[in-house]
Image (cartoon, rainbow, N blue to C red):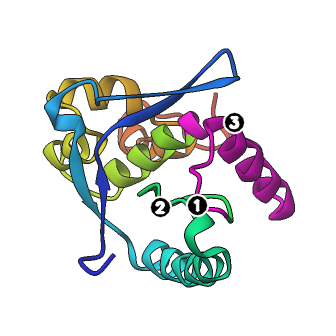
């Protein structure tokens, strides 16, 4: 965290919602260092301080797994455990419950809508092809489409209010 980055070095998935499977990323592009936004960095630093206290309390019993999100004893959370915690947090904050993987699309759509270049989106996603990121992860919704209405309003044949 000294460099305000996080390293993506492998993937962790669940088999049958019971077993954690760790494997290499799908491609070399999947292995990447990502800069952390300031609010995320601050939250992770606070969490790291808590982890330091837990590590001191447990001594040699603490597992140095190398992962960021871990239990009090240092073991990495499973995908299922992270999902449960995220859903609980969404409920607590009064947010609509979304699948975590769906949140990935929301994040890339947000970045694209705010002018982040396609090549940066692809790099952030760990894709070798921009086309993959745009096809699967940038999903405009009705709010995004609303801006196009001003263009439509510029057409000469637009009905004037009160005429049909």
> Which residue position is annotated with label 2?
64
Pick the front one: 4 or 102? 4
Where in the figure is residue 104, as x and y percent of width and height?
48, 41
User: What residue is rendered at 28% in x and 44% in y?
Assistant: 9
Q: Which residues are magenta?
A: 73-102
74 versus 23 height, above or below: below
160 versus 1 height, above or below: above
Q: Where the N terminus falls, by quadrant?
A: bottom left
User: What residue is rendered at 80% in x and 64% in y?
Assistant: 93
Q: Residue furthest front?
A: 60
Query: Which of the marked residues, 1 or 2, is nearer the chain's N terminus?
Result: 2
> Which residue position is annotated with label 1?
74
* Mark pair 1, 2: CA separation: 6 Å
Left or right: residue 128 compared with residue 113: left
Pointer 1 with pointer 2, Cβ within 8 A: yes
Residue 71: image quadrant is: bottom right
User: What residue is rendered at 60% in x and 40% in y?
Assistant: 100
Give the numbered dot on residue 80.
3
* Mark pair 3, 2: CA separation: 21 Å
Query: Which of the marked residues, 3 or 2, is nearer the chain's N terminus?
Result: 2
Left or right: residue 128 compared with residue 159: left
Quick check: can you spot residue 150? Answer: no
């Amino acid at each position: 965290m000294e460099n305000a980055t996080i390293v993506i070095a492998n993937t962790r998935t669940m088999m049958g919602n019971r077993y954690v499977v760790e494997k290499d990323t799908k491609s070399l592009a999947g292995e990447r260092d990502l800069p952390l936004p300031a609010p995320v960095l601050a939250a992770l630093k606070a969490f790291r301080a808590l982890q330091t206290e837990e590590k001191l309390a447990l001594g040699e019993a603490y597992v140095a797994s190398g992962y960021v999100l871990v239990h009090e004893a240092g073991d990495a959370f499973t995908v299922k455990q992270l999902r449960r915690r995220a859903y609980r947090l969404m409920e607590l904050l009064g947010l609509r419950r979304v699948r975590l993987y769906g949140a990935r699309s929301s994040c890339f759509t947000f970045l694209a809508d705010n002018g982040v270049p396609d090549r940066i989106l692809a790099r952030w996603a760990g894709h070798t092809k921009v086309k993959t990121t745009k096809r699967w992860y940038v999903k405009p919704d009705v709010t995004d489409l609303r801006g196009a209405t001003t263009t439509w309003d510029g057409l000469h044949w637009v009905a004037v209010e009160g005429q049909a």
